[in-house]
Image (cartoon, rainbow, N blue to C red):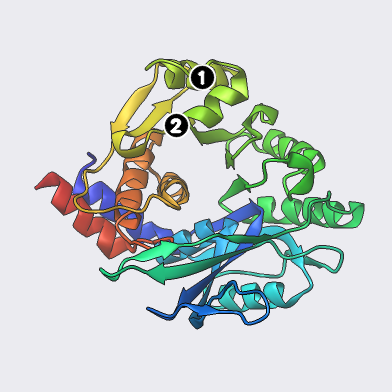
Amino acid sequence: MMPFELLDRWLTRFPRLTIGLVGDLFLDRYLELVPGAHELSIETNLEAYQVENVRNVPGALGTVLNNLAALQVGLLVPVTVIGDDGHGYDLLQELRDLPVDTNRIVCDANRLTPTYTKPLRRDDRGAWHELNRLDVRTRAPLTDESTDAVCRHLQEVWETSDGLIVLDQMRDASQGVVNPQVVACLRQLARQNPDKLLYVDSRAGLGAFDFGVLKGNRSELTAACGVPNEGRNAAATASERLAARTQRTVYCTCGDEGILVTSPKRSSDLVPGCPVAGPVDIVGAGDAATSGIVASWLAGAAPAEAAAVGNLVASITVQQLGTTGTATPDEVRARWREVNR
């Protein structure tokens, strides 16, 4: 674990940072059901969920925005495409509470704003449980006009930000914001300034990136380079191949074990995770780690030190149940003290 003085120095630099982001921006809509209510519809004889509270939260790329905002990063500039619809309106309303420049969010009337609607019901002990999720999104490629707008905005953001996060949520690359044309644009930007941080987190498309600092879990990394996802060394083997391909650092999240950090010039090192007690909710833990890694890297941390900060942030968010959690700088400082006690 890094000295507290170093951690504190990086945290105090976060408000000076401008971070660009590109990827799929979702609306997460939580519907909290009335406890104990089970009403049947007269027409269908199916249960009609009785909602007493609605919470709207930016999801996917928005989860990273939430985490970076909680860490008090100064300015966030997302490049994305949403629909010109009610869900899009609600999403933009939520972003106005964050240090976000929304001028490069493209509203396309031909698309639906990606939305996860999540009914939540409390059990007898008061714990929330998610019921069947309702997904809304357009299952078709971006129009040429929207793709051109994304690439144009990316050039502007790349020139004015300290670093760029790429978050590719879609399993079908042709249907998301990070489509093949946008990947080609990102490759060109990386070649223009190879020393600037371009951090890539892709659920299914890491294999398309031969540039940038790549991050994924073991299954995502092994799939990206065709390594069988078997045995203890699979993650290290995949990470080393990808680092050799990109000539940049590769991060592999390994759950509560920590983060495997691989550079092109040395073998993989595991930065241990932070132990936590009690029940956990791992939803969004990878995005929390990304936020800690990127912000601390841009604040001056070395790659392994940045991974340690990512572990601290993720260890805080997983203890926030029933929601996608965040961590503040003071909470990160407090967790460091707990871990080093």
Q: Which of 22 and 58 is in front in this view?
A: 58
Q: Residue 290 carries which label?
A: none
Tag 2: Cα neighbours inside 10 Å, few (<14), some, or many (≥20)?
many
Q: Which residue is outermost to the left?
A: 341
Say which residue appears at 72% left-offset and 35% top-offset: 187
Query: Element at badge 1?
Result: helix
Q: Is tag 2's residue or tag 1's residue first in the polypeptide sequence?
A: 1
Number of marks in the rendered image: 2
Q: In which quarter of the image is residue 194?
A: top right
Q: Which amino acid does label 1 sit on?
A: Ala
Q: In this view, does 12 lie above or below 33?
A: above
Where is residue 128 shown, x and y percent of the image?
Answer: 37, 66
Residue under the image location 26 percent in, 47 percent down: 6
Secondary element at image label 2: strand
Mark 1 lies on residue: 238
Q: Residues within 10 Å of mark 1 (few under 14, many from 20)?
A: many
Q: Which mark is residue 252?
A: 2
As drawn, 129 above or below 34: above
Q: Are marks 2 and 1 in contact (CB under 8 Å)?
A: yes
Q: Locate residue 63 relative to residue 183 in the image: left or right.
A: left
Q: Give residue 296's position: percent from left, percent from top.
A: 40, 48
User: The residue under label 2 is which amino acid type?
Assistant: Cys
Q: Can residue 247 be seen in this view?
A: no
Instruction: Point out residue 41 in the picture as x, y percentages from the top left corner.
Output: 61, 79
Q: Is residue 91 visible?
A: yes
x and y percentages locating residue 124 in the rendered image: 28, 70
Q: Nearer the viewer, residue 297 or 179?
A: 179
CA gap, disc 2 to disc 1?
9 Å
Taking depth in this image into account, of 194 and 45 the one nearest to the observer is: 45
